[in-house]
Image (tube, rainbow, N blue to C red):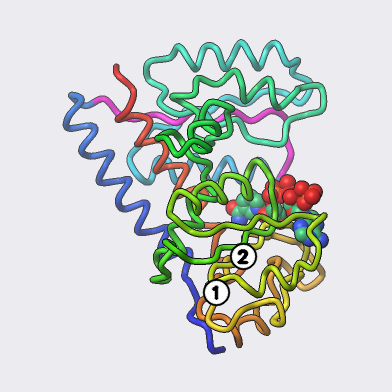
Amino acid sequence: MAAAIIDGKAVAAEVKERVAAGVEEFVAARDGDVPGLATVLVGDDPASQIYVTSKRRQTEEVGMRSIHEQLGAETPEDELLELIEALNDDETVDGILVQLPLPEQIDQDHVVAAIDPAKDVDGLSATNAGLLAQGRPGLVPCTPQGVIELIRDAGTEIAGAEAVVVGRSILVGRPLSALLLGADATVTVCHSRTRDLAAVCSRADILVAAVGSPRMVTAEMVKPGATVIDVGTNRTDDGLVGDVDFEAVGEVAGAITPVPGGVGPMTIAMLLSNTIAAAFARPR
Ligand code: NAP
């Protein structure tokens, strides 16, 4: 393999060390007050349970308090909105994370809109998305923030680079394109209606795939020496694979993230980073 492999686990561990140091500083400055992250899980989806358990464990590992609210799968929207209201008002809660997806009787947009933007550590509210779009400080979605950390870790200069993001979701593609633009890249965002995706991708110094289509980015689509970040997580008969054909693209790219072990570990690390930032920013 010609490309350097970007080690998401190692970068995530560094981020968590920074967060743990921040927590110690916070506790010392605030008379023993400990930052708190509230997780809310509605229903018993096994994958969501695994994610929430991992988030809670890592919250405690960095010295923060984990508060967990478990609601039944049949919970009406009103009840969830009341719980969020209570968490918004709770002085000991600095961040609120409602695990998605939600059961069908609940409108995700209503829930995200109900979270106090100062505690919106997922960065999905219209307020935080608007601040990011305007290049102003706010809470930024975790996965795209993790992608930026990985690009920097690879030693890739973002300013002036041609960056191509494949995918335009509110969770990944859109906020990532705003972050890259904010870091002075020349950004192109591709989606399912893009004409000649291969030609657009092959211009990229920085190529990020966030689609959810196994190994769709092939070696022919990659500029030699490019930094390639694979956000995709696809469960296939071969196990978990990304959106990038890792083996073939690794022969062309300058640096590449593996799946698993690339972007995945960064998402929770950035959630913890957002929580300590929210704790410092919020007057108590
Ligand atoms: P999403 O909401 O389904 O968005 C997928 C995007 O890909 C859409 O913008 C879609 O275009 C575009 N797309 C679909 N087919 C395409 C094609 N043939 N060519 C170009 N673009 C195409 O997905 P998401 O939430 O952003 O997630 C993307 C992937 O990242 C998934 O595999 C997800 O599991 C993974 N993910 C991983 C993490 C992590 O922590 N590792 C976090 C979040 C997501 P349209 O807008 O035109 O439909």
Residue 185 placement, left or right of 190? left
Q: Quadrant of residue 216?
A: bottom right
Q: Which residues are magenta?
A: 33-46
Residue at figure coordinates x 26%, y 42% from the top left = 22
Residue 239 placement, left or right of 62? right
- Expressed as whole percent of the image width and height from the top left, the position of residue 152 reads 40, 63
Nearer the N terminus, badge 1 or badge 2?
Answer: 2
Viewer-proximal residue, 4 or 76?
4
Q: Quadrant of residue 113?
A: top right
Viewer-proximal residue, 120 or 92?
120
Q: Dot 1: within a 10 Å radius of its alpha carbon, few (fewer than 14), some, or many (20 or more) residues? A: many
| Residue 144 on the magenta span | no
Q: CA distance from mark 1 to mark 2?
A: 8 Å
Label 2 secondary element: strand
| Residue 44 on the magenta span | yes
Hey, what amino acid is under mark 2? Answer: Asp
Residue at figure coordinates x 43%, y 14% from the top left = 90
Residue at figure coordinates x 53%, y 38% from the top left = 133
Residue 198 placement, left or right of 58? right
The residue that disc 2 covers is: 230
Q: Dot 2: within a 10 Å radius of its alpha carbon, few (fewer than 14), some, or many (20 or more) residues? A: many
Instruction: Note whether 83 is above or below 62 in the view shown.
Output: above
Check residue 256 in the rendering and tell me which mark sits there, or answer none: 1
- Expressed as whole percent of the image width and height from the top left, the position of residue 107 reads 75, 23
